[in-house]
Image (spheres, rainbow, N blue to C red):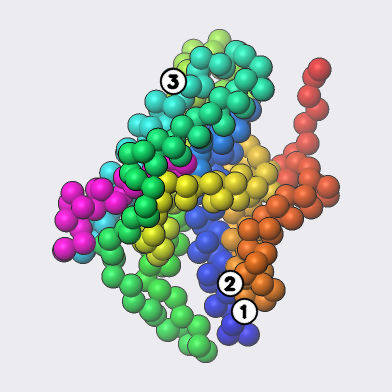
């Protein structure tokens, strides 16, 4: 039982990371009906922005919660700017084009970020500084949780709550829901559709950056291609929960993280990456709209 509880804690922690990345996928899809395949690479940029912010602030020399928070906020701000540039420079020009053109553009942006990161940061792995020294906390019965896992859980839940409050109770959030429902009607009501789309990209990129920094705290080895698999798994999590549904993205991320850790613990680490795509096939066969998604008829 203690082993199961330990694996469950590890799975929920990993699931929170997937949920943060999946939220970016689901928000952009809800607004634009676009799968932003570059989103996993924004997660990678978040880790690197956090690395250089930590070096600039000297966070490793004098580790404390204030400097760690500053590193997180700088990385989120940097990736928010990157998300804005990507939307304005790459996606906005093809917004009125076919979905295939937008999809190809997203793949191109992803390749650009990956290989651009390799050129700028170098191909060799970098190691994220320990801005929060690791300690283990015994929960009893042989179950432990590290302070870094607690930080991942706490920051992830806080960011999800903030996003939920923004979407439900602010003018920007109401405008996002209106644009998601109908672009034309929202524009007729005086909402700047272009601005709301940009804000959506900024929010999603900031969440991905937070995920990158949080993962780097626990697994300090980072490299330019680190966003490929987590990005794909987070996309599967978004589909699993119901693409376009914010609570569904969170649920899908948690299911994905728990399933992955349980497979590693009870089956074999060999199938760690395969479980994501097994879940994708199953959900597409059983419930194509996702766990919390609703099937909608599309006019043709």
Q: Identify the image quadrant of the C terminus.
A: top right
* Total numbered labels: 3
Q: Position of residue 112 (x, y in %)?
A: 46, 32
Given contact means CB atoms under 8 Å apart, are the residues at marks 1 and 2 in contact?
yes
Judge whether residue 280 can be spotted in this image: yes
Q: Nearer the viewer, mark 2 or mark 3?
A: 3
Provide the residue span drawn in magenta. 41-62
Cα separation, mark 1 vs mark 3, equals 46 Å
Q: Position of residue 124 (x, y in %)?
A: 37, 52
**Which quadrant holds residue 119?**
top left
Instruction: Reply above or below: 276 against 163.
Output: below
Which one is nearer the viewer's eye here, 106 or 2? 106
Q: Identify the image quadrant of the N terminus.
A: bottom right
Q: Residue at x 37, y 61 (%)?
A: 220
**Which quadrant holds residue 62?**
bottom left
Q: Residue furthest bottom?
A: 141
**Left or right of 58, for residue 119:** right
The mark found on residue 88 in the picture is 3
Which one is nearer the viewer's eye here, 64 or 262? 262
Given contact means CB atoms under 8 Å apart, are the residues at marks 1 and 3 in contact?
no
The mark found on residue 8 in the picture is 2
Q: Position of residue 270 (x, y in %)?
A: 65, 67
Q: Residue at x 50, y 88 (%)?
A: 142
């Amino acid at each position: 039982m203690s082993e199961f509880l330990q694996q469950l804690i590890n799975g929920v922690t990993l699931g929170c990371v997937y949920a943060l990345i999946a939220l970016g996928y689901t928000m952009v899809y809800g607004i634009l009906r676009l799968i932003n395949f570059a989103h996993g690479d924004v997660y990678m940029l978040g880790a690197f922005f956090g690395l250089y912010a930590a070096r600039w602030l000297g966070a490793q020399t004098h580790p404390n919660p204030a400097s760690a928070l500053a590193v997180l906020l700088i990385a989120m701000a940097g990736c928010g700017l990157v998300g804005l540039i990507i939307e304005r420079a790459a996606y906005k020009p093809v917004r009125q084009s076919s979905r295939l053109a937008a999809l190809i553009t997203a793949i191109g942006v992803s390749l650009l970020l990956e290989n651009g990161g390799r050129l700028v940061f170098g191909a060799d792995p970098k190691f994220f500084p320990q801005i929060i020294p690791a300690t283990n906390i015994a929960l009893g019965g042989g179950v432990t949780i590290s302070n870094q896992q607690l930080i991942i859980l706490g920051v992830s839940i806080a960011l999800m709550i903030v996003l939920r409050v923004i979407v439900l109770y602010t003018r920007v959030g109401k405008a996002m829901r209106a644009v998601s429902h109908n672009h034309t009607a929202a524009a007729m009501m005086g909402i700047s559709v272009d601005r709301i789309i940009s804000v959506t990209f900024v929010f999603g990129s900031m969440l991905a950056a937070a995920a990158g920094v949080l993962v780097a705290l626990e697994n300090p080895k980072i490299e330019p291609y680190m966003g490929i698999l987590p990005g794909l798994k987070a996309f599967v999590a978004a589909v699993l929960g119901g693409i376009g549904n914010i609570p569904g993205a969170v649920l899908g991320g948690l299911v994905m993280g728990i399933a992955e850790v349980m497979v590693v613990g009870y089956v074999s680490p060999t199938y760690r990456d395969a479980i994501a795509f097994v879940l994708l096939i199953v959900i597409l066969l059983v419930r194509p709209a996702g766990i919390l998604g609703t099937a909608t008829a599309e006019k043709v």
